Image (tube, rainbow, N blue to C red):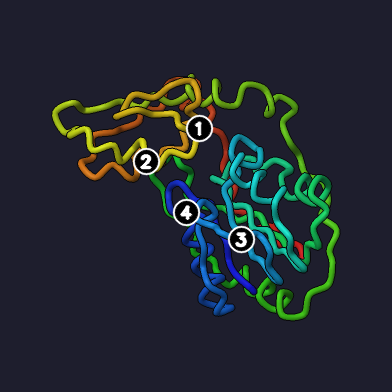
Amino acid sequence: MNCVIYYSNTEQSKTIAEYFSQKTSFPLFDINNLSSYDFDTVILVFPVHCQNIPKPVKCFLAKLQVKTLTVIATYGKMCYGNVLYEIQKHYKHNIVAAAYVPTKHTYLTESGFNDFNALCPIISKISDPTPITIPKSYKNPLSNICMGLRSRIGVKIRKDYNNCNNCGKCNAVCNNNAITYGKTNRKCIRCLKCVENCPTHALHFINRLPMRIYLSKNKTDKTVVYI
């Protein structure tokens, strides 16, 4: 079976996955709703979190049995780290194409990715697959330290009690069991999936000073493709 599998909290990676699904006619699956991990060809799309591979993606890759794998890492126009190289090194799958794709940053109001022509060579490579070697890229040496804590220091999630009806939607969508009726705990990584999925818009986020300083740095919209 061939498929496109995505992990997405704020729909940015899902949009890229939908493009690949449309171009290849492969069915589209959410990584959280899989019943099997045995495939012929997989296109995996996921966001970089603090220059690292998100935990659900790590769990998926550890279980995955696949003949050919294409890996697409989306990033918020800051540093994308070294995740593609790390996937190839640690999981030993047969990777035939890969890319870093710039999308809207989770904590900023800006445009999303629209240069889909840059991804066309990947479609061609998937139909004629040969293994590739992914080079190392720059990763901040501090990026593995206290990722969740850094996110919580940088971003505050607020609950509007007047709008909250205690429906439990935020509890249900959280992959980390990090929120209970709008109140976050230490497991929260500030992915904002709860904010995006709140049906009454009772949850909001605020960028604190450390995050505002970080986000004021120069951005990049470079799409990096390995085929």
Q: Quadrant of the C terminus?
A: bottom right
Amino acid under label 1? Answer: Ser
Which residue in the structure is indicated by mark 1?
Answer: 216
Of callouts 2 and 1, the N-terminal one: 2
Residue 172's label in the rendered image is 2
Asked whether disc 3 touches disc 4, contact meaning CB atoms under 8 Å apart, the reply is no
How dense is the environment of label 4, judged by Cα within 10 Å: few (below 14), some, or many (20 and up)?
A: many
Q: Which of the two marks, 2 or 1, is nearer to us in this view?
A: 2
Q: Nearer the viewer, residue 125 or 27?
A: 27
Amino acid under label 4? Answer: Gln
Above or below: residue 34 compared with residue 159? below
Of callouts 2 and 4, the N-terminal one: 4
Separation of marks 3 and 1 at Cα, in angstroms: 42 Å
Q: Residue 4 at x, y = what percent?
A: 58, 66
Asked whether disc 2 touches disc 3, contact meaning CB atoms under 8 Å apart, the reply is no
Residue 36's label in the rendered image is 3
User: In what element is the residue under mark 1?
Assistant: loop
Q: Residue 87 at x, y = what percent?
A: 75, 48
